[in-house]
Image (tube, rainbow, N blue to C red):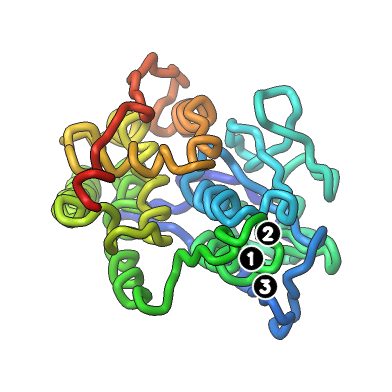
Amino acid sequence: MADDKKQSWTTSITKSGEFKRRESAFRNRITADGSSGFKAERDRYHLYVSLACPFAHRALIVRKLKGLEEIFPYTVVDWLLGENGWSFTDQKPKCTLDPVNGAKYLRELYFKADPNYDGNFTVPVVWDKKTNTIVNNESAEIIRMLNSEFNEFCGTPAQRELDLYPEALRSEIDELNSWIYPKINNGVYKSGFATSQEAYDKAVKDVFEGLDRVEEILSKKRYLTGNSITEADIRLLTSLLRFDTVYHGHFKCNKKRIIDYPNMWGFVRDLYAVDGISETVDQEHIQKCYQLSQRSINPHGILAIGPDIDFNAPHNRDKLFK
């Protein structure tokens, strides 16, 4: 059993100083008809998330947009990521103890699912209460399951009909994801955790190449694929919401801010105003998690005072792209 394993960002740093993210290990799928062995059912699954993590945040947004709050309850871990990984507490705002397994640390769920597990203890996690195991811990797959497999449980007809991965746009969405993830979603981490100048220079160059490319797309379209929100927008948004508050300073991605990109900044405020999305954003968790947990970057754990950003500021993208 690998239960002496510690959670450390530095375990993913190569000899050349480059941050490498490990692949998610649990990749089962929930299906509406149960053909996968995991059927979409009421009161069967539980979601474990961090409000700080952009990948877990994707799942919370899709859950909200699809009206699955009652079907998919969730538990928020402590914003402080310690050497034993994510933990559960009821002593901090919005954090709760584990109501399903009574675990002290998220890592306990991983070992319960697989006693020989030898990987990182990441969020989000979808837990199956019926079989007592982890179904999936890959956010890209979780949001697609939430999008398509629980439609009979959606809160309203409009939420049932909402499709964030429509067949007609799948190739375009996949193409967007193929470079937004490595350049932006993961690129900021590669910049922040780089331990050599060469690794940092390469990673941060990719970040701003990606952002410049997004800005160009959003100069012509309200959302990444046109006038409707898709999963590509959600996957991008969670990184942009964290950019100016933590990635710009903490991760040294300080060439430009999102508010310096007029189209992207408008896009962020446009999506933030979508009913339910702002409720999933918690900048206290975001800033405290990154700055107080990642001591290899911020050794003294000093919490920065700002910046002050008004995500509720008005925008005109709805008028520009009718």
Mark nearer the N terminus (2 vs 3):
3
Amino acid type at circle 1 is Asn
Residue 70 at x, y = what percent?
A: 74, 50
* Left or right of residue 38: residue 186: left
Residue 115 appears in the picture as rendered: no
Residue at figure coordinates x 60%, y 53% from the top left: 63
List the single residue furthest toward the bottom: 35
Proximity of marks 3 and 1: CB atoms separated by less than 8 Å: yes
Q: Spatial distance from mark 2 to mark 1, Cα to Cα?
A: 5 Å
- Is label 1 in a helix, a strand or a loop? strand
Residue 154 at x, y = what percent?
A: 66, 60
Front in this rendered view, residue 20 or 80: 80
**Crowdedness of circle 1 by 10 Å Cα count: few (<14), some, many (20+)?**
many
* In this view, 62 is above or below 149: above
Amino acid type at circle 3 is Ile
Proximity of marks 2 and 1: CB atoms separated by less than 8 Å: yes
Q: Spatial distance from mark 2 to mark 3, Cα to Cα?
A: 10 Å
Residue beneath label 3, please? Answer: 30
Mark nearer the N terminus (3 vs 1):
3
Residue 200 at x, y = what percent?
A: 23, 45
Residue at figure coordinates x 29%, y 44% from the top left: 267
Residue beneath label 2, please? Answer: 126
Front in this rendered view, residue 28 or 32: 32
* Left or right of residue 285: residue 87: right
Residue beneath label 1, please? Answer: 136
Proximity of marks 2 and 3: CB atoms separated by less than 8 Å: yes
Mark nearer the N terminus (2 vs 1):
2
Amino acid type at circle 2 is Val
Residue 196 at x, y = what percent?
A: 25, 44
* In this view, 290 is above or below 172: above
Residue at figure coordinates x 36%, y 55% from the top left: 233
